[in-house]
Image (cartoon, rainbow, N blue to C red):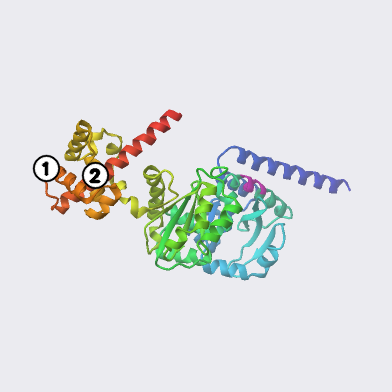
Amino acid sequence: MDVTLNELQRERIEIEHYTASLFTAYISGAGLSAIVNTAAELLGNPVIVVDASFKIVAHSSQEDIDDYIWRENIRKGYCSYDFIAAVNRMESVRRGKQTDASYEVACEETANTKLISKINVGGKQIGNILLLGCKIPFRPRDPELLAIAATILAEEMGKSSYYRNAKNIKVEDFICGLLDQQPQDLCTIRDRMLSAGLKFGTQLLVLLFDLTRYEGSGRYDDYLRERLQHFFPGSPCTYYEGRIMMIHDGTLSKELVRSKPLQQFLNQTGITIGLSSMFSSLTQCRIHYLQALSAIRIGQILCPGQQLTYYTDIQLYELLSADVLSGEAQVYRDPELLMLQEYDATHQSTLYHTFFVYLKNNRNMQLASEELYIHRNTLRYKLEHIARLLDTDFSDSEKMLAYYVSYKVADFCEKAREQQQVAQHLR
């Protein structure tokens, strides 16, 4: 009887020591690796942490891992589609998925037995911790100790908004991997795409949803996710860097973009959308994510109330350097147009604006006069005056293009500076 009590006391003390050591590693702020290495040292066997997308997120020393399959998984940083399919067919894994306790798995390919415990955050499984029987046989208390490690790891991984917000980790991890520019060879992308159950064509588009003005700024809740999937069905999305990023497969109809339900949704939520140009390879995903980000940023400068901006509409402004944006007005103005503006100031005329409207309408007299609400003869008179001041007959298309670009750049820079001044005033 005394022996049994002593054994129970020793086990309790060991469990308390184990828990305290893991908790110390957790509060040290050293991250997952510190917790995993501590667990491996206390359990006497190597430890690997895999998230729900079968990505290797942490592992103890590879020197202790003699399982060639897991050494290869660690080398690649993720488990292959074939490996995942084989694991899911194993009876011991199927049974283990039905329980909350740690469970053993024996693999025919390797001699090592594996002990697995689920990692849950917010009632959702986000991964597993594996104990590989490489060095010593498992002990009766190891399942309980591994479950404790899983609990501590859940606290650490739960700090990440990605694991808190992810709905379909396999899909979202795949997209985040593309954006983070993890190994981008086509073979790796194809393998991970299959594992996530995704299939894409060759007409791809990035949609980026800015949540800055959404209620609870930056919050990615179920309502928002469901509404976006309703408007863009079949387009996988993820929460990334405080925004929602979606990959749309196929052309995006103007009817959908301009539809009343989508416009009402954007009005109600305050969400703005940036759309990239089309691309055909997932290796280009990061580039087009940045395009969509630029569309949001520049679109809000050009048209602060506009809720949807195409990158192709603002591409010109990405060519502007920081020096141009922050410089004096004369830096980015065509000298001849500046002279025209100075003439207006002296003579209380509107030649500068008239010339812009004329260029914007592709030098179409009828359209320009209608927009200016003046008679065509009046417009013709003003253009003749402008031609004399600029010493041009408007026949040089290259020069006309240069004038128009100068107008657009000047307008953008003025709006950008106004926003900067407002922001500084609010501070």
Q: Image check: 254 left or right of 388?
A: right
23 or 246: nearer the eye? 246
Residue 46 seen by the camera = no
Name the residue nearer the viewer: 11 or 186. Answer: 186
Q: Earlier in the sequence, mark 1 or mark 2?
A: 2
Q: Which residue: 45% across, 30% down? A: 426
Measured from the top left, where is residue 153 in percent x and y? 62, 48
Q: Secondary structure at mark 1?
A: helix
Residue assigned mark 2: 354
In magenta, the rendered stretch is 151-155
Instruction: Residue under label 1, please give it.
Output: 388
Q: Hey, what amino acid is under mark 2?
A: Thr
Asked if 67 appears above or below 356 in the picture, the reply is below
The answer to which image quadrant residue 387 occupies is: top left
Q: What residue appears at the point 40 percent right and 66 percent down from the top-left corner?
A: 203
| Quarter where residue 355 is shown | top left
Identify which residue, 127 or 323, lies in the foreground: 323
Whether residue 344 appears in this view of the structure is yes
Secondary element at tag 2: helix
